[in-house]
Image (tube, grey):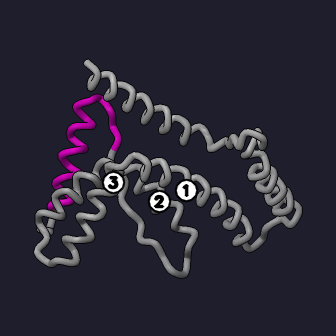
Amino acid sequence: MQEGTGEKILNLIDEEIKRCGQSLTPLSFKNPSFTRWLVRGKVMFYILMNWEELKAYFTSAELAQSQFDTKFKARLLKKMLPDYENYLFFEFATLVVQEFERLNSLFQQTKADPHELNQQIFLHQKSLQNRPYDKKKYQVDFGVSFLTSCNKFLQQNNSAEAHLEI
């Protein structure tokens, strides 16, 4: 891909966001680390926050690439990003990974209070245990963010179906 194309896409999207009266700027990405896996939750969060920008980026990346393997990878990502099920899975997985990272980071402290660590593990275990709130019906509390995204997806599909019926 030509140098600066991704930056141009982000600038265009940023200008559109400003025109809509919002002041959101796409977040920069962090590189995942093989030795510090606690960064993975941040990487996943940044991907979620830049989902629309990534869709635009990989659409243009596929066209701009000349090497077959790079073009193939860009095409795969271009096809995966518009699928809302992938977005929902990513949102759910991000929340779970961040929960575990938060707990793990407490144990990374040099002067951690053992009593506090024990309480945090207990609260984390209770939180996980209470997620399935109706075990007979297999109903699970996935969190407000995930449910909000699901409702948004369902509303978009219902309005699309209504337009198709007309």
Q: Which residue is mark 2?
A: 44
Earlier-in-chain disc, 3 versus 2: 2
- Coordinates of residue 4 in the picture (x, y in percent): 15, 63
- Part of the protein shown in magenta: 5-24
Quadrant containing the C terminus is top left
In the figure, 34 relative to 125: above or below?
A: below
Q: CA distance from mark 3 to mark 1?
A: 15 Å
In front: mark 3 or mark 2?
A: 3
Numbered marks: total: 3
**Label for residue 81?**
3
Amino acid type at mark 1: Ala
Mark 3 and mark 2: span between their CA atoms? 14 Å
Q: Which residue is mark 1?
A: 93
Q: Main secondary structure of the magenta part?
A: helix
Residue closest to the far front:
165
Taking the image as shown, residue 49 lies to the left or right of residue 59, namely right
User: The residue under label 2 is which amino acid type?
Assistant: Met
Is there a contact, CB below 8 Å, between mark 2 and mark 1? yes
Q: Earlier in the sequence, mark 2 or mark 1?
A: 2
Residue occupying image coordinates x 19% and y 71%? 71
Could you tell me which secondary element the residue under label 2 belongs to?
helix
Closer to the eye: label 2 or 1? 1
Res 135 quadrant in image: top right
Q: Is residue 151 magenta?
A: no
| 159 displayed left or right of 115 | left
Q: Horizontal placement of 133 versus 71: left or right?
A: right
Judged from the image, the secondary structure of the residue bearing numbered disc 1 is helix
